[in-house]
Image: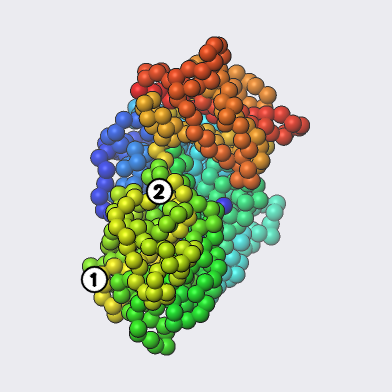
Amino acid sequence: MRLLLLGPLLASPAIAQHTLHADLTYKTVNGAPLRLDVYEPDANGPHPLVIWIHGGAWMSGTKALAPGRIQGLLDANVAVASIEYRLTTQSATFGDVTFPAQIDDVQDAILWLRANAAAFDLDQARIGTWGTSAGGHLAALAGTLGSPKDPRGDTSVQAVGDGFGPTDFFELDADAVNFGCTQYLVHDDPSSPESRLVGFDGPGEGIGVLAGLPGRPEHQLVLDANPITFLDPADPPMFVVHGEGDCTISVGQSRRLLDACEALGVDVTLVTHPGGHTLPASLVGDFHDFFTRELAGTERIVRTVEAFDVPSLVPLDAQGVPVDHDNETVRTASLTWSGCNLSTTVGALPHGVLLDPHPAVSTDGGSLFFNAGALTAGSRAAARLVTPADLTAGGHLRLRIGKASSPGGTRFRVLLRDGVAWWLSSPVTTPVVPGAASASDMTIELAPLSWNLVDTSSGAGADLDEIDDGGETGALVELGAGTPDLTSVDGIGFQMAAGNNLTRMFAIDHLELAVTWTPVGEVSCTSLPNSTGRAAALAAYGSADATQNDLRLRADDLPANAFGLLISGRVGGSAPLLEGVLCLGSPLGRHLDSVASSGAAGEIEVAIDLTAMPAASPPFTAAVVPGETWYFQWWHRDVVAGPTANLSNAIAVSFH
């Protein structure tokens, strides 16, 4: 689970090349059609699919889509279908439009798209649902209610994007009050959208009355409309966004979903922002990233996440103490920041390098803040990572800029420690960001930057204030160009470059130090859930070029601290084995050098040698030959009724 507090960013209006299949009838009710549109990427498929479900309080809305809403998905070769469903204002057309008509329509659209997948080059095994408000509610309900064993067909989905959808109708008004709303949409009233949805909207009725009438059939409809009612450990991952200031549907509704998912071990991320009943433009991209990762297989392995959520202002420069402190972080790294300010300007608020919770520069209660005169070239801040990160495979630094008000953007240089020495990058320029309300993401690829080695001979080199000759206020001494070793990065920082307006400000609101692997191969066979409630997921990264010999296999959703090993072969299969499915045929080999524990996180990653694959006959190893397809699967111990074992899905990699 991740709980983040993010602010609105910027979105691009461009859209990828695609083919639009418009106004396709997927269902007829009372003689009237319900239609959908399919946006098929022009790249080769089969494409994962995201089904967009519009909002509008189940009363209004259309399947029309703005290009920016789906750009990132089409760019990632993910298809999109936008669907109509029966609205509570359309009884004259469709007859009965009370719940569960809406979720019935969503599931029928899923069934129709699966049945017609070949026509649009879709992958039936990779479908997600996404919507906002009422659409978010239906997207989440489709995720928890759907099942591959549905008598009508496979109604399951593999990922859910829920934008500020309701969950428990009976608690909507209470959540609004509990989360600070003094004026809010009264859902208990018979005129509310929820009362109308379940058909209890006459005089003297409404959700508020219905809560005390458990014998009424409409009471059961409210329970059936709650995605939490059908939640189980095997449900798909969910990405949920909600505004802390939402007084139409309180954020308390999404927090209920978060708590329920956590209790059952369902993978869930709740992202909140300071706004109301809306989806900030930047968070559209976060949904794109989620679906791309979960459906298209692009795996971003985050090494360090820094939210800068300190409780109060902390100076990092010589104008205040202390120079070192602990700052809350998540994931694997614990960062201690120190700073240097070359400006001599002083004032009530120190003009220096700070951790500052000022709302003008931060959307989540804190930022790394270079205030006014601290934009002098040479002012800097840096921190050490407790856990070094291997960033050789596409390492990048992703920043959320909360303020960058110098004309043309702020100029800075990245500080990087490679386990031995500090390095200083060539200059980087940010977008212009006037304040937290328009915060902007930027991604900096580390390898292409030019780097200069920094002299650390005068100090221990453990922290920023110990690596320069002049101490806190001295300039760094650069020793010349070189290339840092990205296999063991254990320090990150920023130094202001020349050309900034010294009366302006610069704030980093959020930081991720990450590496992105490119997935290769295809899932050739699925297995069964283990004791986590999910089937272990195996993915291959690196290259299918046998001459590169850089293939890595990563298994997730393993039981904690479960020993296992990689098995492989040149023949696929599907046969029950212990608690899972063996997806390899004979002969198969065991990678004994891959034996490892999944650790507390239930994940493992191994590199393999394509020149010495285990074989079943002398010489007992074989080299991968271009043109061959090899199958890989992770075998792991598990505890169900007793000590036993299970297997992941299988990945088929066709080498060239």
Vertical comparison of 121 with 457: above or below: above
Element marked by disc 1: loop
In the image, taking residue 589 as reference, residue 430 lies left or right, namely left
The residue that appears at 29% across and 67% down in the rendered structure is: 497
Q: Is residue 207 visible?
A: no
Q: Residues within 10 Å of mark 2 (few under 14, many from 20)?
A: some
Q: Quadrant of residue 528?
A: top right
* First in sequence: mark 2 vs mark 1: 2
Q: Residue at x 51, y 18 (%)?
A: 621
Q: Nearer the viewer, mark 2 or mark 1?
A: 2
Residue 480 vertical position relative to residue 119 in the rendered view, above or below? below
Residue 624 position (above or below residue 84): above
Residue 31, x across and y down, in percent: 40, 36
Question: Which residue position holds label 1?
Answer: 499
Is label 2 in contact with label 1 (beta carbons under 8 Å)? no
Q: Residues within 10 Å of mark 1 (few under 14, many from 20)?
A: some
Occupied quadrant, residue 84: top left
Q: What is the x, y in percent for residue 536?
A: 58, 35
For label 2, the SS is: loop
Give the amino acid type for the residue marked by disc 1 in the picture. Answer: Gly
Q: Is residue 219 visible?
A: yes
Label 2: which residue?
485
Q: Position of residue 23 (x, y in %)?
A: 31, 38
Q: Amino acid at mark 2?
A: Asp
- Nearer to the camera, 510 or 34: 510
The color scheme shown is rainbow
* Residue at the image point whose x is 42% and y is 32% from the top: 550
